Each structure stands twice: as C-alpha cells, then as structure tokens.
C-alpha cells in the first residue's frame, strides 16, 4: 500500500466515524446525551492527612436529590469519580451524573453541568480527516503544502482567539483587584511518588491550604502555585486572596497572576506571528 492509499484510507475511516458520531448526536443516543445529571452539594469536608496522597482530591461527602425516586442520595468522591475536587467547602455545588439506570456508576464534576450533545469525539475525528488531507496534499504536491495547510487555518484560529485572550486578561485583572483577603494556613503537604518505565522517580508535592472567608465559610483546597518551598510549608501561615463569588478562585500572589495573564497574551500574539510566517514561507516556496 502506497502512502497515498494509506492516507486516503485514513481520511475515509475517520470521515465515516465522524458521520456516525454526528448521526448519533442528532438521534440523541450519544453517551453524553444518555447521562442523567444532578446538582449536588458538599455536606462534609474531610481534612487531609499530612503526608498522604493527593489522589482523588479533597475528600468530601455529597448529597443530591434523585428526581426519579424522590429520595436524597449521599455519595463520596472516593475512587475514580470524574473531576478531581481540589477546592471544597460545605454547601458548594457539585455536578453529579450517571448513565440511565446505573446510579452506582456516578461521576462528579467541579461545577454542575448542563445537557451535552457529545460532539467532542466526532469533531476530533473531523480534525483527523483534515490532517489526513493536508498530509495527502503534501505527499502529492510537495511539503510546502504542509506549511500552508497547517499554518494557515491555525493562524486564523489563533488570530480570532487573540482578542478574547486580551479581554480575558483585562477581566482577570479586574477580578484580582476585587478579591477579598483572608488568613490561611497550610494544614497538610501531600506527597505522591511515581516511577516510569525507565525507573525514573518523580515526586509530586501538593500543599493543602485552609482559610475562612469573611462570611465564615471554611475552604480547604490544594495550593499548587505561588508558594515558596512547598515541601516545607506544613503549618505555615499564608495570605489568601479569593473571589467572593467563587471561593475556588484564589491565589497567594496576585502580582504573579497578573504577570501570568500578560504572558498568555504575549504568547498568543507570538503564536499568530509564527503561524502566519510559516504560511507565507510555504506560499513562497510553491
């Protein structure tokens, strides 16, 4: 089989899968459309053990009202249960979902989720079809078409995304300025050790911060950034800046957050320039 035949087969297979996926979405039978979704609330937050593992996130007890049975159901986030809950407080709303007729197979999400059509996989399949077409053009007409086919559309998407990135940076700057400040303490430092196939050991350190808002809500959360010497942070007092409307949105260093937002805009702009230059180089080489 030649490269042209292989790439043509690649495009056909992924195109069929994309059509099947979109057809299932129109028929309302995708996995996402068959999920039953609820809004749960955290009833209890279990304090983490210093030196324990971050696996599973902050341990919580969640309750939700089952509209089918009319009963109040209580679940936990023990085991593999979807999104890792890294910020928890009593009363926080959590998304709970499960396949129809299988409430024991529930999954959690950090925020309540609305109905979904399940278009992610077929859209990705369509992207793979496009990649195959670009590769087919490259094999048949020369490698400059790879620069044009990948750089051109990517440059357009990045340029369209840039104004949104700037707006998001400005909005985030306003959010940071409006944050309240509270006293916090590192109540645990979690440690996870993994070994890869080459016997290389990687250690992940996750400090856990606890702080109380002005309204008296106690928040327990993983603190993975802007904390010097995280491995030795157990028992350290810290200043926490948090958004009153979303207690999961907090930081220990607002200046670092602002710098990060500015860097994101710069990187997005550089991406547009690089992709546009790649496209122009490809066009010039035709």
Image: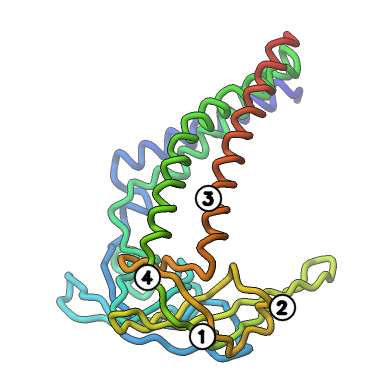
| Nearer-the-camera pick, 79 or 225 | 225
User: Residue 17's spot in the image, x, y percent?
Assistant: 49, 37
User: Residue 219's spot in the image, x, y percent?
Assistant: 40, 80
Q: Badge 2: few (under 14), some or many (20 or more) residues near its Cα, within 10 Å? A: few
Q: Which residue corresponds to the image point at 36% horizontal and 49% vertical from the top-left?
A: 30
Nearer the observer: mark 3 or 4; the answer is: 4
CB atoms of marks 3 and 1 within 8 Å: no
- Residue 209's place in the image compared with 18, above or below, is below
Q: Badge 3: few (under 14), some or many (20 or more) residues near its Cα, within 10 Å? A: some
Q: Which residue is mark 3?
A: 261
Q: CA distance from mark 3 to mark 1?
A: 26 Å
Could you say whether the residue bearing mark 2 is in a helix, strand or loop?
strand
Q: CA distance from mark 3 to mark 4?
A: 20 Å
Q: CA distance from mark 3 to mark 2?
A: 31 Å
- Residue 208's place in the image compared with 19, above or below, is below
Instruction: Identify the mark at residue 185; answer none if there is no mark.
Output: 1
Q: Is residue 247 left or right of residue 257?
A: left
Q: Which residue corresponds to the image point at 71% horizontal and 78% vertical from the top-left?
A: 193
Q: Is residue 150 left or right of residue 107?
A: right
User: Residue 171's spot in the image, x, y percent?
Assistant: 39, 49
CB atoms of marks 2 and 1 within 8 Å: no
Instruction: Identify the mark at residue 193; answer none if there is no mark.
Output: 2
Q: CA distance from mark 2 to mark 1?
A: 24 Å
Quadrant where the N terminus is found in the figure:
top right
Q: Which quadrant of the structure image shows residue 181?
A: bottom left
User: Residue 105's spot in the image, x, y percent?
Assistant: 39, 71
Q: Which residue corresponds to the image point at 28% horizontal and 73% vertical from the top-left?
A: 40
Q: Badge 1: few (under 14), some or many (20 or more) residues near its Cα, within 10 Å? A: some
Q: Which residue is mark 4?
A: 180
Q: CA distance from mark 4 to mark 2?
A: 35 Å
| Nearer-the-camera pick, 271 or 154 | 271
Which of the two labelled residues, at mark 3 and mark 1, occupies the earlier sequence position? 1
């Amino acid at each position: 089989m030649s490269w042209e035949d292989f790439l043509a087969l690649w495009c056909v297979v992924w195109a069929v899968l994309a059509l099947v996926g979109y057809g299932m979405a129109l028929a309302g039978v995708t996995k996402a459309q068959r999920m039953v979704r609820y809004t749960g609330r955290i009833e209890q937050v279990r304090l983490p053990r210093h030196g324990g593992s971050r696996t599973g996130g902050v341990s919580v007890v969640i309750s939700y009202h089952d509209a089918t049975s009319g009963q109040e159901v209580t679940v936990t986030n023990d085991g593999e249960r979807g999104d890792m809950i890294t910020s928890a407080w009593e009363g926080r709303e959590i998304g709970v979902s499960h396949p129809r007729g299988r409430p024991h197979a529930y999954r959690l999400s950090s925020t309540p989720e609305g109905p979904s059509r399940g278009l992610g996989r077929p859209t990705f399949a369509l992207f793979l079809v496009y990649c195959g077409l670009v590769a087919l053009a490259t094999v048949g007409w020369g490698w400059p078409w790879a620069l044009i086919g990948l750089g051109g559309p990517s440059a357009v998407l990045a340029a369209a995304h840039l104004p949104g990135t700037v707006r998001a940076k400005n909005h985030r700057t306003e959010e940071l300025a409006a944050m309240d400040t509270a006293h916090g303490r590192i109540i645990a430092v979690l440690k996870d050790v993994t070994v890869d196939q080459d016997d290389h050991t990687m250690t992940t350190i996750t400090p856990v911060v606890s702080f109380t808002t002005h309204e008296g809500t106690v928040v327990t959360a993983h603190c993975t950034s802007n904390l010097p010497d995280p491995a030795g942070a157990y028992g350290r007092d810290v200043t926490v800046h948090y958004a009153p409307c979303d207690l999961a949105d907090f930081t220990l260093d607002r200046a670092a957050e602002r710098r990060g937002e500015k860097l994101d805009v710069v990187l997005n702009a550089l991406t547009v320039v690089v992709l546009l230059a790649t496209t122009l180089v490809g066009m010039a080489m035709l």
